[in-house]
Amino acid sequence: MLPLRSGWRLGRSAACFSSKAKRELVARYSGEYPEKLLSKKQKTPTHMYVANAETAQRIGQYLEPHLQQSSCDTVMELNSGPGHFTRHLLDRETQFRKIILLESMEYFMPRLHELHTLYPERVKVRHGDLVNLWKLVFMDKMDNGVRVAELLHDVPQRPFTDDINMLVFGAVGSYAFFKHLINSLVFQTSLYNLGRCEMILAMPPPIYIHLTCDNEVGYLIYRSTTVLFQILFEHRFIAKVPREDFLPLQADYKLTKSSKLGKVRSINPEYLYLVKFVPRRNLHELCSPQDLIALWFFIKQNYVSRRNRIIPNLEKWVPGCGPRLIINPHASEPISPTYPDESPLKLPQYTIQSTTMSTRDYFPGINIYTQFGDLRPSQMLTLFRQFRQWPEYQESSFLASMENALLKLETANDEQSLEDVVNLPEEDDLGPEELIEEDTVKPDTAKKAKAA
């Protein structure tokens, strides 16, 4: 993901507050937040909290037109904390009939349980950590547990092609969380096994840029995760919100000449991006549920090197297939913006509009030198569809390679090897710790999620 190289050196002076600044912060927030959220700045926390009522009010104003368009009556708030944004959800009494509050820190639980006492039928409170949901999935796999089922107990279930089953609000700085959402759709497990929930999140600019850029930004940022995210999800940028309005505060970084991602890390570091995204309703028309894993592996495998050439690579699986791609008699089907009222001029630098996807969006003039990185996501989906329909597909070595990768996935015996298998290493790839150095506010969720 958009990584943070070692060149981003965090000075000791940036890691901690001056004593005066710390006293001011503690004086302002000590009654609402635990000391570990106030005493130290962090590089990029995975869990973040809306700091005050003014920030919650401003976010509510940004979201008003989007909420007016939604008919969903169930919402989930991640890390509700002292409940600043929760109050705005409660105020929409006729719209949101069920509010699920997921909190990872024990410190905030008594206050949230008070809300459950006041609204026993409407507010459900659980001590759990959706940001690290992938870890719960892994732990359940190891001991046949039911942690994920317990955590998501109050989430309504709907068929995938129906309207969304839930709105999710929060502030998330974890790259692993977004990778898990992709895997949840591909492997049809976890959160998206219950329906197409829509996420409205505040997130660090480098993560959003990585997920929504195009191939013109360069292969260092435009990777397999980018392609998968844009095929699977519709996305929309809403607004920039000041980073200082969220806790814990973020430490400053010093850019060095050796940083490969200076141009990305220097974009709006003083903000979070408020965005929304939802799985495509027609996803299973674009790619059948049975073929989603093959699509995932096809994209992962062909982006192992950003310089992989399409025809030589595919001929390893289907010898002699090159002429079929070069001599393509089919007309290409145009794609269009998902949200026609969205202005490209108002988007953050390096990001693009969400578009429709097509299985007939052919790359023009493909030849033996064309690289996978030259294709936009819709063209990559089209290429997979062509490959899938060739008569040699069922007997190709591609399926054997995929089965081998899935076997390793099934036999992974620890969290790290699971990550290594699920996220096939890419040549010269920048790890998540480079795109964005994560600090985790250690949640008290090693125990089972507790229901109110």
Image (cartoon, rainbow, N blue to C red):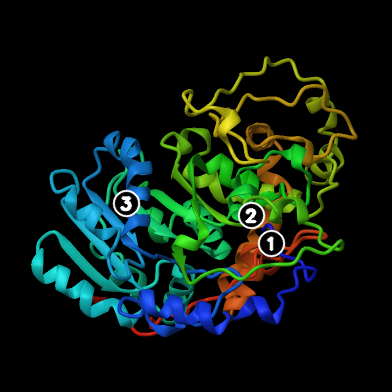
Residue 3, placed above or below residue 128: above
Relative image position of residue 413 (x, y in whole percent): 58, 81
Which amino acid type is shown beneath numbered disc 2?
Answer: Pro
Relative image position of residue 373 (x, y in whole percent): 78, 41
Image quadrant containing the N terminus: bottom right
The tag on residue 206 is 2
- Nearer-N-terminus badge (3/2): 3
Point 66% across, 38% down: residue? 384
Label 2 close to label 1 by CB (< 8 Å): yes
As measured in the structure, the alpha-carbon distance from the residue carrying label 2 to the one carrying label 1 is 7 Å
Point out the residue furthest to the front here: 20
- In the picture, residue 85 is in which quadrant? bottom left
Which amino acid type is shown beneath numbered disc 3?
Answer: Gln
As measured in the structure, the alpha-carbon distance from the residue carrying label 3 to the one carrying label 2 is 25 Å
Q: Is residue 420 left or right of residue 321?
A: left
Q: Nearer the viewer, residue 262 or 25?
A: 25
Residue 449, placed above or below residue 379: below
* Residue beneath disc 3: 57
Label 3 close to label 1 by CB (< 8 Å): no
* Residue beneath disc 1: 435
Residue 163, placed above or below residue 93: above
Residue 64, placed above or below residue 111: above
Secondary-structure class at tag 2: helix
Image quadrant containing the C terminus: bottom left
